[in-house]
Image (spheres, rainbow, N blue to C red):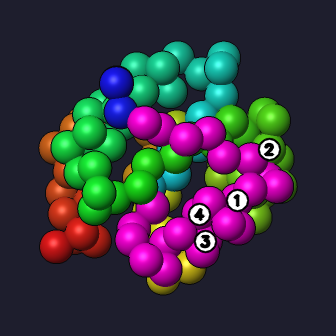
Amino acid sequence: MADIQAVSDASFDQDVIEASKTQPVLVDFWADWCRPCHMLSPTVEEIAKDHAGKLKVVKLNVDENVNAAGKFNIRGIPTLLIFKGGQVADQLVGAVPKDAIEKVVQRHIS
């Protein structure tokens, strides 16, 4: 299993914004009650494993961390945001297939 860190409102700036200045960061916004989030989880783990060292992957529980979710206008989950250089560089909403996520990730790590 890939090492996917859980981030919180308190750690978001350090773990995501600052970290994205050295390598892209993929944030998986999810909630425990969200079935599509659970369906997407193994795919996110595969992406993390496939791009270890080139892409940091973290998860943020929107129920426990409403500030970060609100700040980035997360309206539906699962939502994947890619941060690069301290900014949101890309967004995917819904339980999207791995190849769609892969295509977006490739744009930011190559």
Check if mark 2's residue and mark 1's residue have beta carbons within 8 Å. Answer: yes
Task: Please give the residue where the numbered disc 3 appears in the rendered image.
Answer: 17
User: Is residue 9 covered in magenta?
Assistant: yes
Say which amino acid is labelled 4. Val
Q: CA distance from mark 2 to mark 3?
A: 16 Å
Say which amino acid is labelled 3. Ile
The image's mark for residue 12 is: 1
Disc 4 element: helix
Q: Quadrant of residue 16?
A: bottom right
Give the residues in magenta. Answer: 3-25
Nearer to me, 14 or 34: 14
Apparent side of residue 39 relative to residue 100 in the rendered image (left or right)? right
Residue sitting at 74 percent across and 56 percent down? Answer: 11
Q: Residues within 10 Å of mark 2 (few under 14, many from 20)?
A: some
Task: Please give the residue where the numbered disc 4 appears in the rendered image.
Answer: 16
Q: CA distance from mark 2 to mark 1?
A: 10 Å
Q: Position of residue 39 (x, y in %)?
A: 40, 20
Residue sitting at 51 percent across and 51 percent down? Answer: 27
Tell which circle, 4 or 2, labels the residue nearer the N-terminal end. 4
Check if mark 3's residue and mark 1's residue have beta carbons within 8 Å. Answer: yes
Q: Residues within 10 Å of mark 4 (few under 14, many from 20)?
A: many
Say which amino acid is labelled 2. Asn
